[in-house]
Image (cartoon, grey):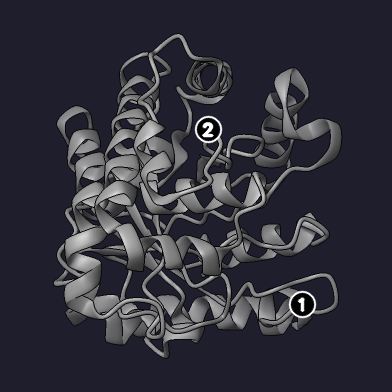
């Protein structure tokens, strides 16, 4: 079975010869942009022999925001056109990678939900997270207007990534579900509409989109906020949330699960067997994930991005283990 068939079968809960494997990380320095970024992705996926490509949107986290001095300034955030460099350059990145390896592997591109794009953009212009939340409390309608504008841009990006660049779908990252950030009814009123605008738009152009319920910061999320979001594959932080792949089958209502490996890291620590295990331990862990869950409706990967410092040989060990069953 070729890699494309293996991944599409896994996503659609059909029979596979082996459980597909995919890990990803952030490229930095000269590899974060342009042709060097394309070549870095290709080198990584060719040398690890992963089953699918998840392209990172490095360099495009921060949505370009106008000056924000008061609540109503959020209403000055505007949607982008298809020719805006912020969108165009990402589409060209994806197109180049698809052209090189899309016939042999499925390719997905990381797209953030509007609230994440807004927070990254705010941080870039000196507005910390706590101040963003203060604006929401004091003038939520203005912030929601900004979220609506960003949603239009992110939806257009998702559409062009699929229809023009040739991606098989998007890897859609939702954040902000921590227990101490929003009450459930507040999240659903302020944030959910923009979340769904982008995801449902992507679903118009591809049936094979992934939902990433991000637990990168190590804080547990109110997963029920995102439980009914329409995506073919669901990826969550099994260790942060305390929800294993096997236990999560009921939670995601039988959809394909992606993950299983703790990948937490920062400047000082690397936490999880992907970093600390011997070859034998890592391969046995991967095999047990498969045996406990079953091969149908499963894709092995990380809770989130792996540390870019990880030796790629450790990724190959997981691939080897998955293909031994």
Pick the front one: 155 or 323? 155
Disc tally is 2
Query: Dot 2 surroundings within 10 Å: few (below 14), some, or many (20 or more)?
Result: some
- Residue 303 is situated, as x and y percent measured from the top left of the image, at 51, 70
> Residue 57 appears in which quarter of the rendering?
top right
Q: Secondary structure at mark 2?
A: loop
Q: Please tell me in which quadrant of the rendered image residue 276 appears.
A: bottom right
x and y, in percent, of residue 64 in the image: 54, 32
Q: Split into 4 quadrants, where in the image is the N terminus?
A: top left
Residue appearing at x 17%, y 53% in the figure: 230
Foreground: disc 1 or disc 2 = 2
- Outermost residue on the bottom side: it is 242
Residue 274 vs residue 180, the one in the foreground: 180
| x then y, percent, for residue 200 | 17, 41
Q: Residues within 10 Å of mark 1 (few under 14, many from 20)?
A: some
The numbered mark at residue 66 is: 2
Query: Does 119 sit left or right of 267 as displayed?
Result: left
Residue 281 lies in quadrant: bottom right
In the rendered view, would you say 150 is above or below 214? above
Q: Is residue 70 left or right of residue 277?
A: left
Real-space CA distance between mark 1 and mark 2, rounded to the nearest whole angstrom: 37 Å
Q: Earlier in the sequence, mark 1 or mark 2?
A: 2
SS under mark 1: loop
Disc number placed over residue 270 in the picture, else none: 1
**Residue 2 visible, this angle:** no
Q: Is any part of residue 45 visible from this angle?
A: yes
């Amino acid at each position: 079975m070729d890699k494309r068939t293996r991944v599409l079968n896994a996503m659609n809960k059909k029979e596979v010869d082996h459980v597909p494997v995919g890990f990803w990380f952030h490229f930095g320095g000269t590899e974060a942009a342009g042709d060097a970024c394309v070549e870095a992705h290709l080198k990584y996926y060719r040398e690890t022999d992963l089953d699918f490509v998840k392209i990172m949107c490095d360099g495009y986290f921060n949505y370009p925001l106008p000056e924000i001095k008061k609540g109503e300034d959020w209403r000055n955030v505007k949607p982008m056109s298809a020719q805006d460099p912020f969108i165009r350059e990402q589409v060209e990145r994806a197109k180049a990678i698809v052209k090189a390896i899309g016939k042999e592997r499925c390719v997905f591109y990381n797209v953030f939900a509007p609230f994440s794009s807004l927070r990254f953009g705010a941080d870039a212009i000196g507005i910390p997270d706590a101040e963003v939340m203060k604006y929401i409390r004091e003038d939520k309608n203005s912030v929601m207007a900004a979220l609506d504008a960003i949603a239009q841009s992110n939806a257009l990006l998702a559409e062009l990534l699929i229809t023009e660049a040739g991606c098989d779908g998007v890897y859609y990252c939702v954040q902000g579900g921590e227990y101490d950030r929003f009450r459930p009814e507040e999240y659903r009123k302020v944030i959910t509409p923009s979340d769904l605008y982008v995801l449902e738009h992507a679903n118009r152009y591809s049936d094979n989109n992934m939902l990433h319920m991000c637990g990168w910061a190590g804080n547990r999320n109110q997963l029920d906020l995102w439980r009914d979001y329409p995506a073919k594959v669901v990826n969550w932080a099994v260790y942060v949330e305390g929800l294993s792949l096997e236990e999560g089958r009921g939670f995601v209502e039988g959809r394909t699960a992606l993950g299983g490996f703790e990948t937490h890291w920062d400047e000082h620590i690397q936490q999880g067997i992907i970093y600390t295990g011997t070859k034998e331990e890592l391969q046995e862990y991967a095999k047990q994930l498969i045996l406990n869950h079953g091969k149908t409706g499963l894709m092995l990967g990380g809770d989130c991005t792996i540390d870019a410092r990880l030796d790629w040989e450790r990724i190959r060990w997981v691939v080897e283990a998955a293909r031994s069953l």
